[in-house]
Image (cartoon, rainbow, N blue to C red):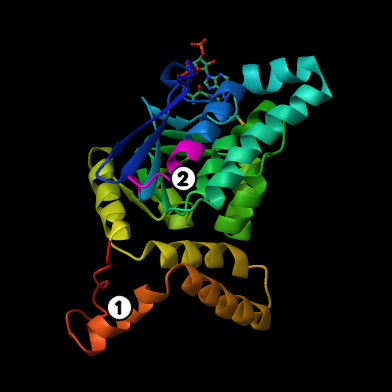
Amino acid sequence: MSENNTATYTVENRIAWVKFNRPEKRNCMSPALNQRMMEILDEVEHHPDTGVLVLSGEGTAWSAGMDLKEYFRETEAKGLGATRQAQRESYGWWRRLRWFQKPTIAMVNGWCFGGGYGPLFACDLAFAAEEAQFGLSEINWGILPGGGATKVAVELLGFRNAMYHAMMGENIDGKKAADWGLVNEAVPLAQLQVRVTEVADVLLKKNPVALKAAKDAIRRVGEMTYDNAEDYLIRAQEAANFFDNDGRKDGIRQFLDDKSYKPGLGAYKVQS
Ligand code: COA
């Protein structure tokens, strides 16, 4: 059993609730936290009791970004090797989360700064408290938004908003984050968990093989030409058929023959 509890998780009704757990440090990401997150992803990814992962933060923060003391100052003092190792550990679990087997939801309950945009973008969907505050605060302490944060801003925000966000060091609240496309939706903090549970419950009823294929496709096709995307999508579906060839046939049969549902109005009943 690991002594490192800088991140924690519980599983309830097939939802893995993963939490940044350094509330006294506003959940900023230290090397220990990054290592613990990778362990948690290892434990949860293929566990049969989980169908969706939700990432949230203990206390008033989602994550105040990288730990300026433990991630930057202390590792840099140890030299280039330690710095690169700390980068591998943080980027490693974000990359793992971007391509996670199961659907992932960021539940942004509070502060979300800088390096926090890495795991924010890594999650497939993101829901924020209206009260949450988002910022590329790097410019306020003298660096550019690194660790992928600039890339996330460009991927999710329009050019002008990305530029303003990176240069001004001003925060935006959850509502504006939703307007700008940084998150899907913002709701009052008191309703956040209920809303996220509602979304997770919908995802839990979908075909899991199709969900993984769909989420990977959304991330992949952005950089492809139309023709390459068309080809990739044919092959991705054929690969998905290898893992679950009966699912889509069930889906067609329940609509055409059983008339038990309409795909335009909801999901077919997935055989468990
Ligand atoms: N790195 C290191 N320590 C951090 C931290 C970070 N990113 N964010 C918060 N902390 C620490 C504080 O130093 C403080 O430690 P202490 O109790 O030993 O003094 C503790 O967490 C609580 O933070 P505090 O600033 O008192 O909380 P607050 O609620 O008043 O303010 C923030 C919250 C998030 C606005 C503020 O902590 C902050 O600006 N953090 C830095 C955010 C940032 O720029 N992150 C980008 C990094 S890439």
- Give the image quarter of residue 89: top right
> Residue at position x 75%, y 26% from top?
83
Q: Indicate whether residue 45 is drawn in magenta.
A: yes
Q: Which amino acid does label 2 sit on?
A: Glu
Q: Decide: marks 1, 2 in contact (CB < 8 A)? A: no
Label 1 packing within 10 angstroms: few (<14), some (14-19), many (20+): some
Q: Please give the range of residues in magenta.
A: 41-50
Q: Disc 1 on helix, strand or loop?
A: helix
Q: Which amino acid does label 1 sit on?
A: Asp
Residue 180 at what x, y percent from top left? 48, 55
Return the residue at label 2: 45
Residue 140 at what x, y percent from top left? 64, 30
The numbered mark at residue 250 is 1
Whether residue 17 is situated above or below residue 21 in the rendered picture: below
Q: How far apart are marks 1 and 2 (CA)?
A: 26 Å
Sequence-wise, which precedes: disc 1 or disc 2? Answer: 2
> Residue at position x 59%, y 77% from top?
235
Whether residue 262 is situated above or below residue 185 in the rendered picture: below
Q: Disc 2 on helix, strand or loop?
A: helix
> Residue at position x 27%, y 66% from top?
271
Q: In this view, does 25 lie to the left or right of 108?
A: right
Which residue ends up furthest to the right in the rendered image?
80
Label 2 packing within 10 angstroms: few (<14), some (14-19), many (20+): some
Quarter of the figure that contains the N terminus: top left
Which one is in front, 189 or 220?
Answer: 220
Quarter of the figure that contains the C terminus: bottom left
Residue 256 at what x, y percent from top left? 25, 89
Q: Is residue 174 left or right of residue 264?
A: right
Q: In this view, does 56 lie to the left or right of 228?
A: left
The numbered mark at residue 174 is none
